[in-house]
Image (tube, rainbow, N blue to C red):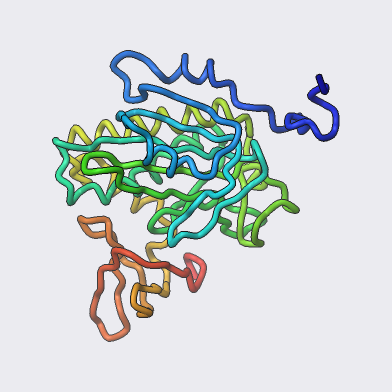
Amino acid sequence: MTPRNTPGHRWSDLDRPPLAAPSLRRALVRPGGLWTSLDVVPTTGSTNSDLVRRTPLTEGAVLVAEEQTAGRGRLDRSWTAPPRSGLFFSVALRPGPGVPVDRWGWLPLLAGVAVATGLSRSAGVDMSLKWPNDLLVTVDGEERKTGGILAERAGEEMVVVGIGVNVSLRADELPVPTAGSLALANAVSTDRDPLLRSVLRSLEEWYGEWRSAGGDPVVSRVQPAYAAGCSTLGRTVRALLPGDRSLTGEAVALDGDGRLVIALADGGREAVGAGDIVHLRPAGD
């Protein structure tokens, strides 16, 4: 057997040990809790795709990959990173019947709040949210994307939420100059086991409150929490919309459906529910 610290072995990077699946299960899968199963696989194309195809798919299933070779973000963008350099996982949720379908659109925003809250606690890094589902950290005084969230329907009753976070990526490993990682943001810890535990516990807490509130974003505190942590609000933005439309204005609010409200130069306002948002100036300028 090849020693783990020799070049070429899949565990040769001692700064990136594999996740400990048995201890994660002991900590997170418990009677009465949200998480019902937790599997860690060495590599897969996409944890979201794997869970969407799983039969039967039960609420609370968690699938974690040490490496994703075909990870997807919004607008079918690719998401790749070195093995064991981040958290790449998906969870299966069944919001109904207590939550109306028209409130399910809050799930990716809820996940953003939960991930930012969990990582702020466990990694000691201030995180902000770029609408609708990017996770940002500050590296050398600049905002950098360090994670993202993708929610997909799985049949009529289930939603699969995929989460990817760059944890230990070094500067020479970044896919693009605007990317970041917890390590580059001076995290107090890049140990992925406690980071994942913290994120999943935070997600369980926020999801439980939201579902108990019937998906009401105000009663569950999701809407005010997202707005408080959203770096998009208060900025001039360009929204690139479906159908090759675009509009420019100030992002001023989130409406009751989680859409971004943009104040236009002509005095009008438009709520954007889908599209790509470009920050045109730093907050406070």
Q: Is residue 168 above or below residue 252?
A: above
Image-quadrant location for residue 249: bottom left
Write the residue at 36% across / 51% down. Answer: 228
Image location (x, y in percent) of residue 28: 43, 20
Q: In this image, 116 relative to 271: left or right?
A: right
Q: Is residue 247 in view?
A: no
Identity of the residue drawn at 31% across and 30% down = 56
Using the image, determine if residue 262 lies above or below residue 199. below
Residue 159 x/y as whole percent: 30, 42
Q: Position of residue 212 (x, y in %)?
A: 19, 32
Total marks shown come to 0
Q: Quadrant of the N terminus?
A: top right
Q: Nearer the viewer, residue 210 or 36?
A: 36
Q: Can you say whether 4 is above or below 268 in the image?
A: above
Please tell me whether residue 265 is drawn above or below residue 64 in the rendered image: below
Which residue occupies 38% across, 57% down?
132
